[in-house]
Amino acid sequence: MRGLGVRVPWSAPLFPPTPYGKTSDTLAPMSAVERTYAEQLDREDPLAHFRERFYIADPEVCYLDGNSLGRLPLHTIDVINELMVKEWGGEVVDGWHHWLDESQSTGDLIGRVALGAAAGQVLATDTTSVNFYQLATAAIKARPGRTTVITDESNFPTDRYILQGLAKEHNLNLVVIPNSDDELITSERLKPFLNDEVALVTFQVVQYRAGARNNVSELTELIHTYGAIALWDASHSVGSVAMNYDADGVDISVGCKYPILIWHDGRGRYSSY
């Protein structure tokens, strides 16, 4: 399912009222399906005021498609109008003198606020799939003579399709780790598949289906002990969980911003925003 809009008789809370989805201690005992319960959650939601910052055409619709395209922030309308009128309209072709640098400056912002990556390592460019293909190809070529690529069955389908094509193109052995019940990739599950023939290992930071969060630091360190390169897909984690790519020694990574972000040696390594 790509998305869903549901018409409901009240405004459902946009966020959990307290950390980790726990309800407030002040809530009176009542059924979770009662309207009064939902209304009380709304009243006590500390983030409820953020609703006023978005364009909502129909307040009776409970919008559940934020994974594909979030609601339009009102401030974005002003920013885009300013871009169209003052920059495109006023500068025309001269705008390229600073537009060309937006990929890096935007990437630096994403790296600082969401990835724990220092400036000069992140680019906002192209699409996730295009960048995944380019980075995976670069990693394979950086390990000449190695013949194996590793991923898992729970990885995002597009990533797996790209790896299948690369394996065929470069005559590589693609190893796909079977699903576990929780879809979590642990060092114990990964280690039996690692050897000196592995060029690339790639997983998601957060599994898109189960929501399991893989240990980036631990798995990256294990992958490095075999001389392989780790490629992380942060599409379902950036902006939603804390990450620290510099400290975790991440080699390369891709991701996308639309679900959450509404608007180690200095190598450039993160792209696709």
Image: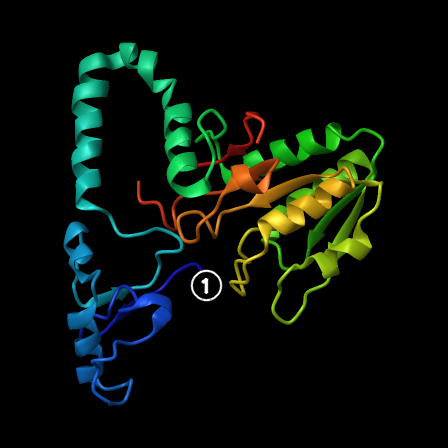
- The reply to whether residue 160 is in sight is no
Location of residue 74 in the rendering, given as x and y in whole percent from the top left corner: 17, 45
Q: Residue at x 77, y 54 (%)?
A: 191
- Rendering quarter of residue 102: top left
- Rendering quarter of residue 250: top right
Location of residue 157 in the rendering, given as x and y in whole percent from the top left corner: 60, 53
Location of residue 11 in the rendering, given as x and y in whole percent from the top left corner: 19, 70
Tell me which amino acid carries mark 1.
Met
- Rendering quarter of residue 269: top right
Horizontally, residue 64 falls left or right of residue 49, namely right
Horizontally, residue 22 falls left or right of residue 234, namely left
Q: Number of marks in the image?
A: 1
Location of residue 114 in the rendering, given as x and y in whole percent from the top left corner: 41, 42
On screen, 43 above or below 199? Answer: below
Q: Residue at x 35, y 71 (%)?
A: 21
On screen, 123 above or below 73? Answer: above
Which residue is denoted by mark 1 in the rendering?
1
| Crowding at mark 1 (Cα within 10 Å: few <14, some 14-19, many 20+) | few
